[in-house]
Amino acid sequence: MTSTIAGKSELTAEFVNPIISSTISVFDMMLGCTPKRTGLSLKSDHIPQHELSAVIGISGKAAGTLVLSLSKSVGIGILDRLLGITTDELNDEVCDAVCELANMIAGSAKAQLEHLEASISIPNIITGVGHAVHYPSNVSPICIAFDSEIGTFTIEAGFSDR
Amino acid sequence: MKVLLVDDSGTMRTIQKRCLSKLGIEDVTEAEDGVQALELYNAGTFDIVLSDWNMPNMDGLQLLKEIRLLNKEIPIIMITTEAERARVVIAIQAGVSDYLVKPFTPDSLKSKLERWVTTNA
């Protein structure tokens, strides 16, 4: 059992650098701001850090979940930076913009891990404080924290081999 | 020039529409997935298709194959997160005309679209 968990953690760890570089690249190119990584930790639960989650499933030789977790204000900031649209509420446009950003981060990260022959799902949005997302069993997700001009956010991810 | 713009993200369609508008292209028909795009394609006349890859109902690769059965000449540009060499090869084999990987800078999108809309204007 221990070796199985270690193997799955190693697979998750393989994603760390691609996720970090993809996140920085996507924010830089699409939003014109360069986020700084402020933390990296293993999560003990499946509850994302913030109230808004864009969730992407990954399948292939690595199967798992990638979550872009952020606050309502950061989501609103993303819409403003992407399209110049200002709003005060968490509406469909904010959710779509956040989904598209998560899609690009996941796609860019998987492209750096071509040997895993991974496919990504269409992103889904989950909102609400304390919501949970699903990860493969026995996987401890990682949480990569970032700070940016539009606020703090995290990328959370966990993978296992098939 | 008539453009069929296919992406399940309204955000991405808006970004591309604004870029096309800067190039003087205003006749843009939008579709949210491959099924809707194919219906629109069959009902109308288009000069170029811009399509995402990962979409619900029918993805961009299948849409590309379906349109190529009908028309081998129309430019079809994939604008997608699918950046792996193997995926690009699959798209080329299916008849894609050009390929732009997301994320992109505004300049790279503009220069990619400019090349095709100028050539086919």
Image: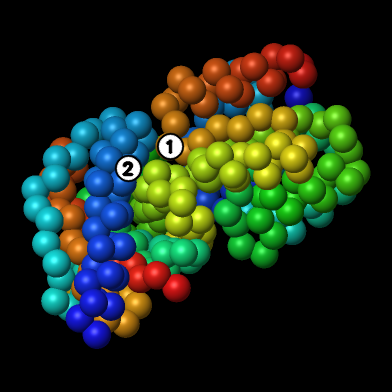
Q: Residue furthest right?
A: B70
Write the residue at 44% across / 25% down. Answer: B106
Badge 1 element: loop
- Farthest-out residue, bottom: A1
- Looking at the image, which residue is at 15% across and 71% down? A43
Residue B111 lies, in percent from the top left, at: 55, 18
Q: Residue at x 68, y 44 (%)?
A: B90
Do the numbered discs 2 and 1 sit on residues whose CB atoms are within 8 Å?
no
Quarter location, residue A83? top left
Question: Hey, which quadrant is residue A46 in on the image?
Answer: bottom left
Q: Which residue is mark 2?
A: A22
User: Which circle, 2 or 1, is nearer the viewer?
Assistant: 2
Residue B98 spot, x, y in % from top left: 66, 29
Q: Residues within 10 Å of mark 1 (few under 14, many from 20)?
A: many
**Residue at image mark 1:** B103
Determine the residue positioned at 23% across, 77% down.
Answer: A3
Q: Amino acid at mark 1?
A: Pro
Judging from the image, mark 1 belongs to the subunit labelled: B
Task: Determine if residue A80 is in view.
Answer: no
Left or right: where B73 falls relative to A47: right
Label 2, secondary structure: give it.
helix
Q: Nearer the viewer, residue A106 or A11?
A: A11
Q: Position of residue A104 (x, y in %)?
A: 42, 46
Which image quarter is the C terminus of chain B in? top right
